Image: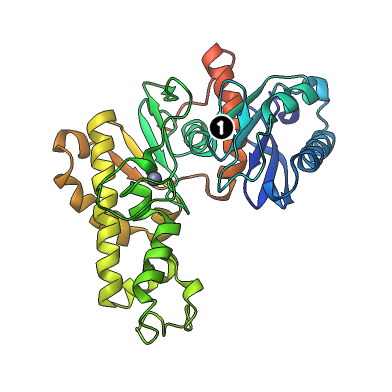
């Protein structure tokens, strides 16, 4: 079969500021993709029409007849009701109860499969990226917030209501910083990008002359304080930055150690923060792991960054559909490179 007819799947990656739509084949090759700006900031009916128009255009461009389409995948920020396929309103989701799964299923007349973005990212890295061939792996988005996805014995961990695995909201310290979810001391409240920015803003609010505030990247503007700035400040050797970074690394190791003790994974993949920080993050995290997990569990576990780069959103969008076929026995990922 040629590429365009080889198990085509349409994917919709729903985000707060943009929606990415892509058409991919069974090998995870992207046959076409396009973005719609505005994301869930648009009214749902308007966005839905733009999404299906864009999906139709991608099918047409790739020469795929709508009747040849095998499935639709959807990756969206949680929370969502998995039984009904309805997205729930949240800080990252402005639509009010959008029945996106059934609407896309009805429109395309194929099965539509929905997952939260972290689970979908886990599936994408497992099928097409760095975790190919793993039986047990964990993916942590490590972005503005911390989403988590877990593969246990070649199965995506979804839990009884499909809300699993909210690894960013495991409490590490009941007296820790307040989290956006309402709990105190969540992993995300210590190590999520949004929380790191807020903490820097709080600490530096009374110190406009602090060396961090005078950095070129900040130029006295509190709104520019974020973890990229923190990283630069650490490299420049600013003591406050080093202290804050040390806590981020220690708390990450605490969370990872706990996950290793439970899941004994071959691999933990960490997104944005780890991807951009490299060794200055991974080395101290590895060093601290011995405080939180046994050698039998952390020594064989590889810490990795995602392999899919900018394509992760697109491939995360199609992956819930491939997973459905994988479970039913109608599709297999390609084996890992030896
Ligand atoms: Zn939380």
Q: Callout 1: few (<14), some (14-19), or many (20+) C-alpha neighbours within 10 Å?
A: many
Q: Quadrant of residue 154?
A: top left
Q: Does 199 sit above or below residue 103?
A: below
Residue 159 horizontal/vertical position (percent) = 42, 23
Looking at the picture, tell me which residue is in the foreground, 90 or 210: 90
Q: Does 295 sit above or below residue 92?
A: above
Q: Residue at x 30, y 32 (%)?
A: 265
Task: Please identify the quadrant where the C terminus is shown.
Answer: top left
Location of ligand 1 given as a quarter of the image: top left
Residue 250 horizontal/vertical position (percent) = 24, 54
Q: Does 71 sit above or below residue 271?
A: above
Residue 293 horizontal/vertical position (percent) = 17, 39
Q: Which residue matches tag 1?
A: 80
Q: Residue at x 37, y 65 (%)?
A: 199
Looking at the picture, tell me which residue is in the foreground, 184 or 254: 184
Left or right: where 32 falls relative to 159:
right
Q: Residue at x 24, y 68 (%)?
A: 243
Looking at the picture, tell me which residue is in the foreground, 47 or 143: 47
Task: Please identify the quadrant where the N terminus is shown.
Answer: top right
Q: Residue at x 28, y 42 (%)?
A: 256
Residue 217 horizontal/vertical position (percent) = 48, 78
Q: Quadrant of residue 227?
A: bottom left
Say if disc 1 is inside 8 Å of ligand 1.
no
Left or right: where 24 falls relative to 303:
right
Label 1, secondary structure: give it: strand
Considering every residue shown, the one lying at the far top of the view is 329
């Amino acid at each position: 079969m040629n590429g365009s007819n080889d198990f085509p799947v349409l994917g919709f990656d729903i985000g707060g500021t943009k929606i990415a739509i892509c058409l991919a084949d069974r090998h995870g090759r992207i046959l076409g993709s396009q973005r719609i700006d505005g994301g869930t900031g648009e009214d749902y009916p308007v966005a839905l029409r733009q999404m299906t128009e864009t999906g139709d255009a991608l099918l047409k461009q790739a020469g795929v007849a709508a009747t040849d389409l095998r499935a639709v995948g959807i990756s969206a920020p949680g929370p969502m009701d998995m039984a009904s396929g309805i997205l729930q309103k949240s800080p990252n989701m402005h639509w009010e109860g959008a029945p996106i799964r059934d609407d896309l299923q009805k429109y395309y007349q194929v099965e539509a499969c929905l997952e939260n973005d972290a689970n979908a990212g886990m599936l994408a890295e497992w099928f097409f990226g760095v975790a190919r061939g793993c039986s047990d792996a964990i993916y942590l988005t490590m972005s503005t917030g911390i989403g988590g996805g877990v593969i246990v014995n070649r199965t995506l961990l979804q839990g009884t209501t499909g809300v699993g695995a909210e690894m960013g909201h495991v409490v590490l310290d009941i007296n820790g910083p307040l989290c956006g979810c309402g709990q105190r001391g969540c992993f995300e409240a210590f190590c999520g990008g949004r929380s790191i920015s807020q903490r820097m803003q709080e600490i530096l609010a009374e110190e406009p002359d602090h060396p961090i505030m005078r950095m070129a990247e900040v130029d006295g503007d509190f709104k520019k304080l974020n973890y990229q700035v923190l990283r630069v400040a650490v490299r420049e050797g600013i003591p406050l930055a080093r202290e804050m970074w040390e806590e981020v690394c220690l708390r990450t190791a605490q969370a990872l150690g706990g996950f290793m003790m439970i899941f004994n994974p071959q691999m933990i993949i960490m997104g944005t923060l780890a991807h951009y920080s490299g060794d200055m993050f991974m080395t101290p995290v590895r060093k601290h792991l011995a405080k939180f997990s046994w050698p039998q569990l952390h020594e064989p576990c590889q810490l990795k960054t995602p392999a899919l780069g900018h394509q992760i959103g697109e491939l995360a969008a199609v992956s819930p559909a491939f997973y459905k076929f994988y479970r039913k026995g109608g599709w297999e990922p390609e084996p890992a490179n030896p």
